[in-house]
Amino acid sequence: MKKKLINILGLMGILQFISYTCAVIFSPLAFPGYDPLSQAVSDLSAETSPSRMLWEQLSALYASGSVVCSTCACIYLSENKVNTALFRLGIYLFTVMNWISNIGYRMFPLSDSGKDIADFQEHMHIIVTIAVVLLSIASLTIIIISGFRKNGIRSIGIMAAISLAMMFVGAIGKAAVPPEYFGIVERFSVFAAVGFNAVIGIYLFFGFEKANTDRNDI
C-alpha cells in the first residue's frame, strides 16, 4: 500500500525518540561532574549548563519530531474518523501536552543546573512541568480506557498503560529512593512520553490500518 506524506511523517516519532535518547546518553560528556544516577535530565539543558549546546544539537529532532508526529496523527485520526471519539480525544490531549512541553520548556528553561528553584523563570518551568504531567496522565488514561473497550485499539491501550506505569514509577520513586538515585527513577518519567510518541508514530506510519475497522463514535 502506497504511503501518503502524512503517514511517512509518522517516522518523526521514531526519530524524536532516537534524538532524545542520544541527548540523554551523550550530553553528559560535555558536563564535567554530571552524575546521571542522582541528577535530573533537565540539568543537561539548563541555561548555564556546560552541556546545553550539545544537548540542543542532539535533541534537535526531538523538539520538532514529537510535535510533528502527534499533530499529524491528530489530523489523520480526525479526517479518517479512526476508532472512537474517546480514543481520538486521548490523542488530541497528548498532542496538546507535546505542544506545551515544546514551547514551555524553551520559554522557561532552568536558569542553573542543580540549584534550588528560586526565580520566576524556574517557577514557570515547574508550572509547565505540572501541566505536562497532568495532561500526560489524563491523555494516557483516556487512551487506556478506549483501548480496552469493545473494538478498541488494545495494543495502543497496552502501550499507554506501560507509559503511564513508567510515569508513576518515576513520580513515586523520586520520593521513595535516596537522593543519590533520583536520576534513575526520574528517567522513567521522561522516557514515558517520548516512548509513547514513538508508538504513535509507528501506528501513523502504517495508517492505523488494524484500528480503522471501527469508525463509529461512542
Image (cartoon, helix red, strand yellow):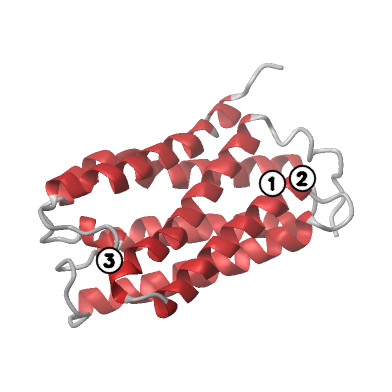
Residue 16 occupies which quadrant of the picture? top left
Residue 128 occupies which quadrant of the picture? bottom left
Q: Which residue position is annotated with label 1?
A: 78
x, y (%) of residue 61? Answer: 35, 38
x, y (%) of residue 197? Answer: 53, 47
Q: Residue at x 69, y 46 (%)?
A: 78
Residue density around tag 1, few if under 14, some if 14–19, many if 20 or more, within 10 Å:
some
Query: Marks 2 and 1: in contact by CB < 8 Å?
Result: yes
Q: Nearer the viewer, residue 140 or 121?
A: 140
Q: Is residue 101 left or right of residue 199?
A: left
The secondary element bearing badge 3 is classed as loop
Q: Residue at x 18, y 70 (%)?
A: 114
Q: Is residue 195 above or below residue 162?
A: above
Q: Which residue position is annotated with label 2?
A: 81
Q: Which residue position is annotated with label 3?
A: 38
Res 171 seen here: yes
Residue density around tag 3, few if under 14, some if 14–19, many if 20 or more, within 10 Å:
some
Q: Amino acid at mark 2?
A: Lys
Q: Amino acid at mark 3?
A: Ser
Residue 138 occupies which quadrant of the picture? bottom right
Q: Is residue 44 above or below residue 70?
A: below
Q: Is residue 189 left or right of residue 128?
A: right
Split into 4 quadrants, where in the image is the C terminus? Answer: bottom right
Q: Marks 3 and 2, Cα distance to the nearest angstrom?
A: 45 Å
Q: Is residue 105 above or below residue 119?
A: above
Q: Nearer the viewer, mark 3 or mark 2?
A: 3
x, y (%) of residue 181? Answer: 33, 67
Query: Marks 3 and 1: in contact by CB < 8 Å?
Result: no
Q: Is residue 36 above or below residue 211?
A: below
